[in-house]
Image: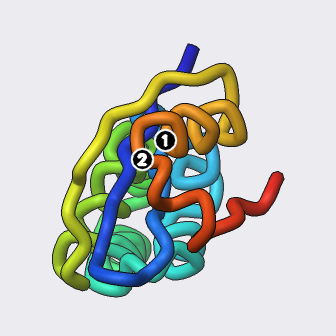
């Protein structure tokens, strides 16, 4: 079972964010954050990579780069939630499910008013 945070903003479609580790943030870092519209976090993490490459000597640069990637993997989804909150979304529900589709179904069970407004896509 995985946990998902359901973020709401007015009449906009709810956004589900997986809780926990993000392999996408670990591997792609700033690109993954930018793809999820976490612009500030993407820019800061990109700047951190540039500073590490420009200022750190080689053995330390590798360790720092791997450390930054690990940190982004650990907090990537939290940064995504933070970006949603700064765009006006509010965390309303925490849902459990084997996958995102099951989490959407549980959300619709708790909020039947959303059934006619939103049709979640299956990934």
The residue that mark 2 highlights is 111
Report the residue at 46% width, 43% height from top: 73
Q: Nearer the viewer, residue 89 or 25?
A: 89
Q: Nearer the viewer, residue 65 or 18?
A: 18
Residue 49 vs 64, above or below: the answer is: below
The residue that mark 1 highlights is 107
**SS label for mark 1:** helix
Task: State left or right for residue 13 relative to residue 55.
Answer: right
Task: State left or right for residue 115 relative to residue 58.
Answer: right
The reply to whether residue 42 is in sight is yes
Residues marked 2 and 1 touching at CB (< 8 Å): yes
Report the residue at 36% width, 85% height from top: 39
**SS label for mark 2:** loop
Report the residue at 62% width, 67% height from top: 116
- Horizontal and vertical percent for residue 2? 53, 22
Graded by Cα atoms within 10 Å as few (under 14), some (14 to 19) or many (20 or more), the crowding at tag 2 reads few
**Quadrant (top left, top right, bottom left, bottom right) of the N terminus:** top right
Report the residue at 22% width, 64% height from top: 82
């Amino acid at each position: 079972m995985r946990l998902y945070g359901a973020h709401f903003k007015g009449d906009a479609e709810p956004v589900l964010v997986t809780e926990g580790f993000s392999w996408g943030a670990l591997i792609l870092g700033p690109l993954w954050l930018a793809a999820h519209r976490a612009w500030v976090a993407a820019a800061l993490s990109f700047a951190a990579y540039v500073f590490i490459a420009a200022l750190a000597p080689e053995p330390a640069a590798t360790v720092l780069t791997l450390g930054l990637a690990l940190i982004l993997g650990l907090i990537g989804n939290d940064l995504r939630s933070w970006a949603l909150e700064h765009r006006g979304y509010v965390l309303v529900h925490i849902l459990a499910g084997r996958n995102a589709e099951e989490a959407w179904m549980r959300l619709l069970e708790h909020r039947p008013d959303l059934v006619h407004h939103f049709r979640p896509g299956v990934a």
